[in-house]
Image (cartoon, rainbow, N blue to C red):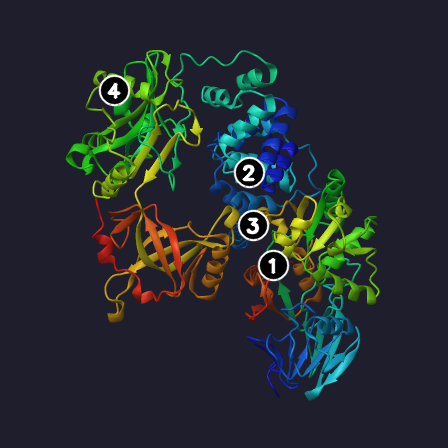
Amino acid sequence: MAAPFSWIRPEPHGVHVVPADVWIDPSKAVDAALVTHGHADHARGGHGTTVATPETLAIMDLRYNTREGATPVEYGETIRLKGGVDATYIPAGHVLGSAQILLEHAGERVVITGDYKRRPDPTCPPFQVTPCDIFITEATFGLPLFAHPPIAEEMGKLLSRLEAHPDACVLVGAYALGKAQRVIAELRAAGHHQPIYLHGAMEKMCRLYEEFGVNLGELRLVADHDKDDIRGHVVVCPPSALNDRWSRRLPDPITAMASGWMRVRQRARQRNVELPLVISDHADWAELTRTIEEVNPHETWITHGREEALLRWHQLHQRRARALALVGYEDEDD
Amino acid sequence: MEEFAALLDALIYTRSRNEKLRLIAEYLRETPDPDRGWALAALTDGLDFKAVKSSTIRNLLKERVDPVLWSLSRDFVGDTAETAALLWPEPLGGVGTPPPTVSEAVDALGVMTRTSVMTELPRLLDRLDSAGRYALLKLATGGMRVGVSSRLAKVAFAQAFDVPVDDVEEYWHALEPPYADLFAWGADGADPPDTENLPLFRPFMLAHPLEETVVDLADYAAEWKWDGIRVQLVHVAGETRLYSRSGDDISATFPEMVDALDLPAVLDGELLVRGVHQGGEQGGAASFNALQQRLGRKTVSKKMLTESPAFVRLYDVLMLDGEDLRGLPWANRRKRLEKLVPRLPDSHFDLSQLVEARDFDHLAQIREGARDDAIEGLMLKRRDSLYVPGRKTGLWYKWKRDPLLVDCVLMYAQRGSGKRSSFYSDYTFGCWDGDPDEGAELLPVGKAYSGFTDAELKKLDKLVRQTTLNRFGPVREVERTLVFEVAFDSVHSSKRHKSGLAMRFPRIHRIRWDKPVHEADRLDGLRALIRD
């Protein structure tokens, strides 16, 4: 009999499921890939077969034109892979279509979270705790100083700043996939029903969200409007456009950024942010550690982020853990 | 404390100088005494609480948070006070009691001892939310990092109450926090504070770099820019004080200067140590290195006083025998200074000589020779310039000699702090101790953290992360792949470094992405430039 868990192997370019010869979120092109969600550091084009949720496949199609070999799996659905491996896609609560992947083989259970959060998000179904032997988790915000405030507080900050400057606009830098749509949906939930203006790079992804039933209210493109139309409104753009020449067409923009990194003052200063909004699609420290306690795995593997601190936490709580040091996973502008 | 905390946060996230001024002025107008005075002192680094240091905060946190998690967090944030504010475990049941006012906090901090601080500071922290804790810890330890200089704070005071900023500067140094008399004068129209018989610091007149400007020597006088520290010596009503450029009282460090002046005057000059390094035998001043041995000491040994006696080379006279000369043109003050010098003991004073030149080109030639005399460069002063505080364009220029350049190899990088926290922005670089093709090694020769753009910093940070060989806490040793062209003002021998030398003012002049590391310079070349 093979050694326990010898069928799943962390390699520098992703996690390899040996009997099925498939890779989870590989950072280079492979024959068969299981993809957790559509962010660029997890979902790359060029694989022979790509297994993912229909939402993730649509996102990948939009971004990389990867229609070939696309194999959709619904949440809760189990598919049988080669070599007697079962894969089940479970909501991760990160962005539209994001999933954890439960792998079962020879009576052993492994969960790969991809990226996840535990907060409610109007744009995707919530994370589900899935008991397993090995829990492969992210640790993007794996330091005890990260505690994301309730999103309603951050929306309140944004709206009160807008109200205080009716002749200006608040320009929110937000990651184009996920963060931007969540901010818009949360603004609607907070009772803000004014049109929201978009940077051109945001448009297609917002439309895709709407096709999947996420209502974002009235959206307008900055390019189609004059400065005066935009006064007193919220504008959403990718973080890279915040200090770009593009923003000069806006009426006295107040620069905001929606990201978990905004918790650290000097980080916000580095980005020249005037209104930091601590909004993240990743689990904060309390969510990470609570999740591990709830899942209660035999061993935790940490894919990326601040793995040293999360390893230390395991040590302090007499839990087994190891860091995988995968390449190519980055701290996106989250 | 909430208003002060909100002010700090608003200042952190505000880029515009005018907006910063508006924020501070508004706070000063709307906040009662003495809170606003304490806040003003905190913004200008005027508070010092002996019992509360960064190490105190570290120790307090390590009692409450796992030390490894604390260190990893501190390393990520790059600021002890902020890390502590974020990590402080809030009391069970939340922050209940009303938060302390600024003055309540200042009073409590002021009476804390090294022992009591371990129980008293937590009590204050438990009454504040995260932003409040941040403000309290910044108030307690200084180093606000909100992009507000003490000058800006004074300008904001002047704006808040519509009074002249030069007056604020002048009264400032006569008063102690919380500056009750300053607010009484500014906000309530009381008489200005009495400064006549106090040995007060007067704000220095400063110079702009000359850069491409060409001046007519008919309008400007030239003198050497000596390489010591700029000081102001004040004698009034039997009392003498020596002030540094920032207005710190350094009398205790140079007691011989305090004894040397006994007539009522305010003098501006360069503090130097006797030697033959600067300007040769006649120049009579040792290198900055020699002066440095004497800086920062609270007491001075007899040996030091005899071996490295200090003196002041005089540039200007601001007040004399009770008369304020600052409203006179430089040429008139210079005449008064020349007449005054013979009345002073020549053991402790001499006059900074003017540099005579036929025209600007001739002066440029003279400046070229400045390095041989180990002088920092030249000063150009408009002959009709009044003595005005700060840097006013067109009045005084400094014209430093060109820097020396050397090609060094990046060896270690350290994370920066403040705005650069989490970027590897402090670089240690070395030169070869022989022929690199024959197995020579690199020895560190200096460290620099300036001279590159934000875009270059990002590129450097990436390179450091990709080529890390070893990690030592916040420091990373990197593969030897990158050459820096380093600019520096001078180089001196040093026992503290393995290379046996130390650079003055090293900064990155250019990043030589293109240059192979074996073509970097050797130690021999650098040693040949030593002037001690």
User: What's under tag 2, amino acid-wise?
Assistant: Leu
Q: Is A291 left or right of B345, judged from the image as shown?
A: right
Instruction: Nearest to the eye among marks 2 and 3: give it.
Output: 3
Instruction: Nearest to the eye among marks 1 and 4: give it.
Output: 4
Tell which circle, 1 or 3, labels the residue nearer the N-terminal end.
Answer: 1
Residue A50's image quarter? bottom right
Percent x, y of residue A287: 68, 58
Q: Residues within 10 Å of mark 4 (few under 14, many from 20)?
A: some
Which residue has dot 2 on it? B137
Which residue has dot 1 on it? A142
Q: Calculate the distance from the C-alpha at mark 1 to the C-alpha at mark 2.
A: 25 Å
Q: Residues within 10 Å of mark 3 (few under 14, many from 20)?
A: some
Pointer 3 with pointer 4, Cβ within 8 A? no
Q: Give the residue at x 48% y 29%.
A: B46
Q: Give the residue at x 47% y 52%.
A: B453
User: What's under tag 4, amino acid-wise?
Assistant: Glu
Which residue has dot 3 on it? A270
Q: Chain of mark 3?
A: A
Q: Residues within 10 Å of mark 2 (few under 14, many from 20)?
A: many
Name the secondary structure under disc 1: loop
